[in-house]
Structures are given as structure tokens and as C-alpha cells.
Amino acid sequence: DARDKHRNHHFQMVESNLRDATEKDKKTHEYFDALLDSDEDKAHILLEDIYLSMKRPRPEQIDIDFAFVIDVTGSMRPYMTGISSVLKSMLHEGSSIERKLVKKYPEVKFNIRVGSIGYRDIDDKNDQFQESITNEGCHFSSCMDDVIGFIETITENATGGFDLAEDHLGVIHRCGSWDHPSDWTAAIKCMILFTDAPAHSMSPQSNVQNADNYAVRHPLGLTSDIVVQSLIEKDIDFFFCSFNPSVTSSTEENLARDYLNHPKNKEKREITVIPMVSEDQTTSEISVTVRNKHVIFVLDESGSMAHDWAGVEKVYNNFMTRRQQNQVMSDIISVVQFDSNSRVTVQNESISTASRTLSYSGGGTCFHPAAKTACRIARETMNLHDPLIVFMSDGGTGARDATAAAAEFSSLRQEIMNLHNNDRDLELHVIAFGSGNMTQLREIANASGIGKVYASADTADLSDVFVSIATGADVASLVETEIGKRISDVVADRLSLEFMAYDH
């Protein structure tokens, strides 16, 4: 009996093992079938299930090195708050990345270190690079308070960049070449670059002025193939996060091709490209044309503006300064001032030379003459510069006059849409200052499909509105959402796959 019991127990164990093996084999076949069917979501779930069913010993700790590489030139200013905020969230204990890793692999402790580097362009010379370095000389730190403090420092003042292309090759090579004995020592290494511009020599063909000062050769002789080698040799996974995908696509394609095809990339790993905004949020052409604007101020100088005119002039200057900080030297500026009539005080002037002084007249208020003049000026440069109209008034006018003004802008809008095959609209910002007639001003804003109306109680509010228009600050909320979701998901998933290598 004892022998039979032992034999039966043995048979039961064999049957159980065969069932387990059959089930695992079935899952393995299902996994490869999903891969063949290009069903990535199903394949990922099956692979994770197979992984979790393994009984092999796993490492107790996995070290991860993150390097955040942040373009801090002027054009990135609208995104700085969002980047800083989300990176702080990612690095904080219990961040979304850490939660996902701990949830999937509760038996493993993840030790995360972070290095950061802010970069500007080649011609910024001594101000080009700001990189984190510990007292010991290492670029990576596990003290998240120090890391967050450094990120806040480099993102608080986005300036510089002498052309539209940026020195991505230089910063990737520099970061990948960090050579302190404690640099890049983790089992999993990730370099994550944030930008809105193409790399030198990879800028899309366009007639935009000042596009690429180093289109032929990098001063250090760097090429895509050379910088990719520094990543491959140190086994660094690279993530390219773009706030302007239509402009950076050529850069992404070059880097991705050279990374994938590099002879030392035996595992055929690929660069991960993360568009931080959707393609339909950028123009179908090179999006640097967003910087190629004809900004037309249409400013109410009626009698009621007498006490506030000095503030208006200051706000106008703040706008100009902020646009220059955002690397939009190709902007041209016009100013239409109006009371009962309209007059042009600045016309088609470069942003760098346009008058910063606006004289004051005083009188009644009529919208239509000013709208007609602004539209005429816009048409003169419409083929080369996209009109951006800022219409500001603290009062109202006759109902017919307001409607006629709206009709002028509506006509201009239609011409713009016809010129660009319905791909562009009239950028029209209408500001009700003080006691401005919101109903009439909203009618004017509605003349454009993307028209916006703002209310500002005083010149301090007006300054915030002008700066928001100048910087595109309304993208900050989008950035915070997109960075948090995309970076956390894509990086954590990539790390999960890398971690599985420990079981082989």
C-alpha cells in the first residue's frame, strides 16, 4: 500500500508538472502567435504572465540610471514649467514609474539614480551646458531633493539658441561620455531628451531664416553615427521626447536608423520616440513657421485709456521681450492705434528694431476702421508671415460698427484658409480691458475659428495675457498631462522588458 501511495503520488506530480508545462507551452505559443499577428498589447500581457509564472531566483535589487537631457533654449520656455513639474512627480517616492515597477515585481528593490543636463546651442559657448555633478564628481545622484533642485534651476530660465536647430548631437555625446567611475554603472540605463527643435544638419528643408548655422558640419565633427556609438557602447536606451514632431521627425529618423543598425547593437534595440503633442497640434509644414509671425497690435487709445496708456506701452514692451527670449527673431511687428479713426504707428518692422515707444492720442471709439487697417497690413505680408492679431479695447462701439469689424476679420480668415488649403486659421486674440464690451469683443473673436477672448481688469492682468500670448503658456497643462502619461508608461514598460533579461 505504501509503495502504491508513493507511486500514485509520483504519478500525480508528473501529471501536474506535465499540465504546468503544457500550459506554459500553450502560453508561449500564444505569445509568439500574438507577435506574428502584430498584436503588441496581447503579446505584452502574455509575456508578463509567462514571466510572473517563472520560479527562478530573481535579483533582490536592480539599479537604474536616468539621465534627463533638457533643451533650455528660448523656444522651450512654454514647456519648462510642465517639464519641471512632471519630472519632479516622476522622481518622487511612489511616482508612477516606481509604482508600476513595484506592482509588477514586488520582490525587487529598485535603486534609482538621476543625472540631469540642460543644454543650449553651440554659439551659446560657455552657457551651453549645465550638468549635475556631485561633490565626488559623479553625474548621478540618488538624493532626489538634490536632483529636483537642480532641474528647477536649469528650467527656470530658458534662453539662448542662435538658430532654430539645436545641438542635440553635442549633448547626447557629452552625456553619453560621462566617465566618472560611478557614472552609467546601473544595469538599466536610460537617456531621455526633451526638445522642440531639429538637430543641426537634420533640419527640414524650408525657407525660414536662421534655420541652421551648422547645416554642413558640426564643429566637433560629430555625426548621428558617432553619438549613437556612445549610447550603444554603454548600453544606454535612448528616448526622444518632442514638443514639435513635424520638425523633429528627420532627427528622430536619423538617430533611430543609426541606433538600430549599429553593428554593436546585437539585440537590435530601438530608440523610443515620444511625441509630447499630437501631429495635428503642429503645422503640416515645418512648425518653426509658428515663430515666423506678423504680430499686429490693434490698440484702443481713446480718451478713457489716458491713465492706463503708460501701462499698455510697458505691456507691449514685455510682449516684445518675451518673443525675443523665445527665439522668434523672424517676427515682424505692426501697431494700429485707434479712437474714432485708426492710425499706423509701427508697420512691418523687425521685432529687433520695432519702436518700443507708442504715442497717445485720445478720442472716441470705433472698431471698424482699426479692423480694416489691420487686415490691410496683414495681407501685405501674408505669404511669408502668419498674421497674429492682438485686438484690445476698454470700451464699446455701435452694434453695426462691431459687426463690420468682425466681418473684416472673417474675410481675412477666409483668405488665409484659402491660401493654405484650410490648414491654417487666423490667430486672433481679443482683449476686453477694464470695462470693455465683452459681447462686442466676443463677436470679433468669433470671426476666427480659433479666436480667443480675454478679460483683464488692469495693466497687471493685461501683462499676463500678453505674455501668455507671446509664450503659448496655455500648452503647460497639456505638457504636464502628456509627459506624465507618455514618459511614465513608455519608460516603465521598457524597463520591465529589460528586467526580464535577468531571468535568462
Image: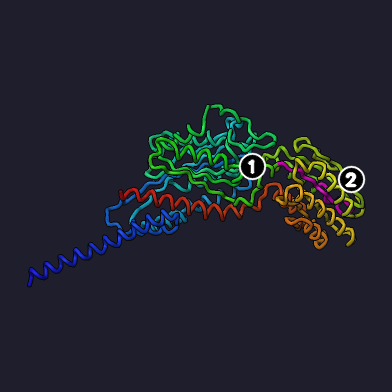
Q: Determine the residue positioned at 82% across, 42% down.
A: 380
Q: Determine the residue positioned at 81% across, 55% down.
A: 410
Amino acid type of the residue that numbered disc 1 sits on in the rendered structure: Ser
Please tell me the numbered disc located at residue 343: 2
Magenta-colored span:
292-310
The quadrant of the rendering that contains the N terminus is bottom left
Q: Position of residue 464 (x, y in %)?
A: 71, 51
Q: Can residue 264 be seen in the rendering of this structure?
A: yes
- Secondary-structure class at tag 2: strand
Horizontally, residue 205 falls left or right of residue 70, namely right
Please tell me the numbered disc located at residue 75: 1
Along the line of sight, which residue is nearer the eye, 158 or 434?
158
Q: Determine the residue positioned at 82% across, 53% down.
A: 411
Per the model, the C-alpha gap separating discs 2 and 1 is 33 Å
Q: Can residue 135 be seen in the rendering of this structure?
A: no
Q: Position of residue 241 (x, y in %)?
A: 54, 46
Q: Circles 2 and 1: CB distance less than 8 Å?
A: no
Q: Residues within 10 Å of mark 2 (few under 14, many from 20)?
A: some
Query: How many discs mark residues in the rendered view?
Result: 2
Q: Residues within 10 Å of mark 1 (few under 14, many from 20)?
A: many
Question: In this picture, is 358 found above or below 454?
Answer: above
Horizontally, residue 149 falls left or right of residue 398, namely left
